[in-house]
Amino acid sequence: MQYIEAKNIVTKTKNNLWFGTDYNMNIYRGCTHGCIYCDSRSDCYRNENFENIKVKAHSLDIISANLRSKCTKGVIGTGAMSDPYNTVEQQLGLTRGALELVNDYRFGIAISTKSSLIARDVDVLKAITKHSPVICKVTITTYDSDLCSIIEPNVSSTVKRLETIATLAQNGIYCGVLLMPLLPFINDNRENVFAILHAAKSAGASFVYPYFGVTLRDSQRKYFYDRLDEHFPNMKQRYISTFGDSYACQQYSTTILYRDMEAEAHRIGILCRMQDIIRDYRGRYQKNDDTKICQQELF
Ligand code: SF4
């Protein structure tokens, strides 16, 4: 672990198409969860020595100043470039500290994670829910525990993640599953998708949002292919012959699978379209969302 300097941590999003988030917040860079497909290893992020977690120094002071200066409230997304509940969060508690600030300044929060550590912060999430939108997205890519330990080796198992969803849901926190990436020829099959859909529903999830395929480029592709060579004989050759150098790698057959998944999701009462999910979790706060209050006037 090392500390790095940062001027700002809470930044405006270009649009709010991704789960309706208005701001981004990343306290950490790098991640120790070891997902073999992780896009954050791509060259464009210049995140050398990716498994060494970099912590933004004085992050809570910076976040506090950033939130105080915002004239428009909104939902802050976290978890895009590093898991906010990575291994050092257990000791440092910076994600928890940031959530307390989000609550104090009356913003909403959208968290993506694969870690059951998020359950530690249920009390703060409940407090935020009282005034602003909250959405917790727990990534689950495979129902198969053995496969999970290969493609996401250092983080909570699928069973643990489902238990985490149940804990969040039982505490009235809006939550669901990010079903991505669905790796071609590995976990993008009907059996896996339907098993996760039903398990998520049983756990109390409100949604399952899928991405059929994986994006691959430069260093990230190399890391992924090296892991394929270790664990999946001949799979690298299959990827190369099917997708070449394509960035988006998807099987055509998955469009049929998506249609079937959508029909099943509708039948069992779980959302899987982005606009429906955004409307569902933000809808009841719409009046608050539209209210523009300069935080500097309040503090
Ligand atoms: S949890 Fe996210 S950031 Fe961490 S290794 Fe996995 S995909 Fe990458």
Image: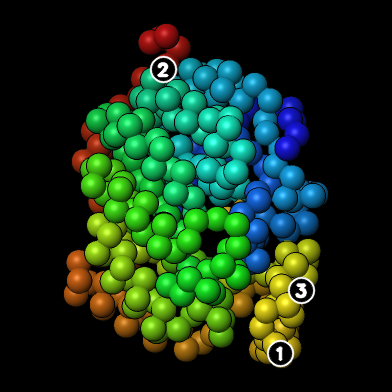
Residue 123 appears in which quarter of the rendering?
A: top left
In the foreground, 145 or 54: 145
- Badge 1 crowding class, 10 Å Cα cut-off, few under 14, some 14 to 19, many 20 or more, is few
Q: From the Cβ of disc 1, is ligand 1 less than 8 Å away?
A: no
Of marks 3 and 2, the one in the foreground = 3
Q: Is residue 3 visible?
A: yes
Quadrant showing the C terminus: top left
Quadrant showing the N terminus: top right
Horizontal side, residue 160 vs residue 244: left or right: left
User: Which residue is pictured at 52% across the width and 74% down the height?
Assistant: 146
Residue 149: percent from the left, percent from the top? 56, 67
Vertical position of residue 62 compared to residue 243: above or below: above
Residue 249: percent from the left, percent from the top? 61, 77
Q: Give the residue at mark 1.
A: 234
Q: Amino acid at mark 2?
A: Cys
Quadrant location, ligand no. 1: bottom right
Structural distance between the alpha carbons of marks 3 and 2: 50 Å
Q: Give the residue at mark 3.
A: 226
Vertical position of residue 114 compared to residue 230: above or below: above
Structural distance between the alpha carbons of marks 1 and 3: 12 Å
Q: For numbered disc 2, what is the local secondary structure?
A: loop
Horizontal side, residue 149 vs residue 221: left or right: left
Vertical position of residue 167 compared to residue 233: above or below: above
Structural distance between the alpha carbons of marks 2 and 1: 58 Å
Q: Earlier in the sequence, mark 1 or mark 3?
A: 3
Q: Give the residue at mark 2.
A: 294
User: Which residue is pictured at 65% across the width and 66% down the height?
Assistant: 36
Of marks 2 and 1, the one in the foreground = 1
Q: Amino acid at mark 3?
A: Asp
**How many numbered dots are placed on residues in this image?**
3
